[in-house]
Image (cartoon, rainbow, N blue to C red):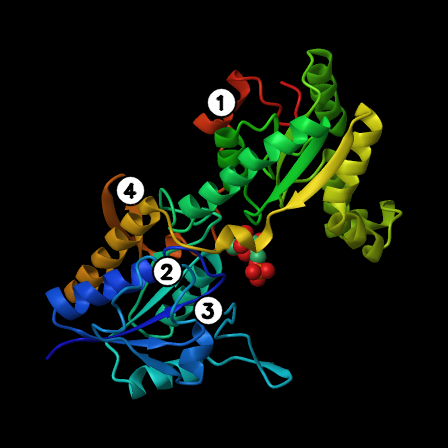
Amino acid sequence: MSKYLGILTAGGDSPGLNAAIRAVGKASLGTYKMKLVGFRDGFRGIVHNRTVKLDDGALSNIITRGGTILGASRDKPHKMEVGNIVMDMTDVVVENYHKNHLDALICLGGGGTQKNALRLFQAGLNIITLPKTIDNDVAMTDTTFGFDSALAIATESIDRLHSTAHSHHRIIIVEIMGHKTGWLALGAGLAGGADVILIPEIPYDIQVVAEAIRNRSKAGKRFSIIALSEGAFSREDYEIKQAANSKESTGGNSMTREEVEDRMANRTMRLSALLQELTGLESRVTILGHLQRGGAPTAADRILATRMGTACARLVNDGVYGVMVASKGEEAVPVPLDQVAGKRKTVPLDHPWIEVSRKIGTCLGDLV
Ligand code: F6P
C-alpha cells in the first residue's frame, strides 16, 4: 500500500517554499510511489479541510516562483480564531488527518511552526517538518531556506543606498527584517559594506554609533550606511523594555505601558533623529519590509530546499516522524522536534561574521 502524505506551508512565506514542495512531491510521487495532497493557508487549511491536488502537473514549473502555491497563514491549531472566538482546533486537525487517510503530515515553517508541529506530533499524528524562514533563526539547523534570497535582496538594497547616501552626504539607516535575531542585518551589512551594523544580540550605545560616524566625517567620508536589524535595541531602550517586562521593577519605571510601546515602535525614527542631532549630518530611513520576502529564490535556496524536500520524502518512506529535517553541512539529518521547538538560534557573539566585521572596522554599536 502506498503512503498518503499531506503538506502545508505555515508562518510567513519565504522564497524556496515552492522548490521544497516540488522536491517533496517529485521524490514522494516518483521515487517512493506515495500520494500527496496539499492543504491551503497553513494549519487553517487542515482545520477547514481545504485541500489542493498535488500531482505531477501541479508540481511543474514552480521552482522559480516565490511565495507558496499553497498559501500561508500564522494560524496555530491550538489557538485558532474561529469567528470572533479563539478555539483549540487540535481535535479537528486530527479528525481531518484521518478523514484524508494520511500516513504523515509535512509542515514547512519557521520557529512557530516547529512548536505547532510538536503539539500535533504529541497529539498522535505522524509529523515531519522542514525549516524555512528568511530570519535563519531555527535551532539545530545550519541554515533555513529563504535566508539566502532575503540576504541577496537586503545586500542589493544596501548597494543601491550607497550611491545616494554618498551623493547627499547623508546617513542612511536601512531597517532589515530578522525578527529577534540579527542574521539578516549582519550578513547583508557585511556583504553590502555597511559602516555600522546593529543587531538584537548586541544592544547598542547611540554615542558609540555617533562617534563612529563623526570619525568617518573627519576622515573625509561624509556619509554612512547603517544596517539596522528590526529587532535591535539601544541599551537605554533595552533597559526600559526589560523594566516594563519585569513586574518588580514596573514601579521604578516612570513610563506607562503605552509610552513604552510607543517608544519601542518608533525607535528607528528616533535613532535617525538623534544621529542627525549628534553628527550634524542629514539622516534618512529605508525600511525594506516585505520586499525581502518577495520574488524568486536564489540558486542556493533552491538547492537547499530540494535537498531538504527529498530527504523529507525519504524519511517518511522510512517511517521516521516527530523530526525536523535539518541541514548540517552537505547532509540532511532528522532532529527530534522537541530539540527544536521553542528554541531560537541567535547570532553567537563569537560568530565569525561578528569577528570579521570588527576586524574591518565596522561599528557594531558597542565599545570593544
Ligand atoms: O519571520 C519572517 C518575518 O518576515 C520576520 O522577519 C518579520 O518580523 C515578520 O516575519 C513579519 O511578519 P508579517 O509578515 O506577519 O508582518
Q: CA distance from mark 3 to mark 4?
A: 26 Å
| Mark 3 vs mark 1: in front | 3
**Disc nearer the start of the sequence (1/2):** 2
At label 3, counting other C-alpha atoms closer than 10 Å, the crowd grade (few under 14, some 14-19, many 20 or more) is: many
Q: CA distance from mark 4 to mark 1?
A: 22 Å
Q: Which residue is mark 2?
A: 65
For mark 3, give the secondary structure: loop
Checking the image for residue 328, the label placed there is 4
Amino acid type, residue under disc 4 in the picture? Lys
| Mark 2 vs mark 4: in front | 2
**Disc nearer the start of the sequence (2/4):** 2
Amino acid type, residue under disc 3 in the picture? Ala
Quadrant of the snapshot with the C terminus:
top right
For mark 4, give the secondary structure: strand
Note whether ligand 1 is within 8 Å of mark 4: no
Figure check: 151 above or below 79: above
Please tell me in which quarter of the rendered image ligand 1 is found: bottom right
The x, y position of residue 241, in whole percent, is: 74, 46
Checking the image for residue 72, the label placed there is 3
Figure check: 213 above or below 237: above
Amino acid type, residue under disc 1 in the picture? Glu
**Tag 4 near tag 1, CB within 8 Å:** no
The x, y position of residue 149, in whole percent, is: 42, 47
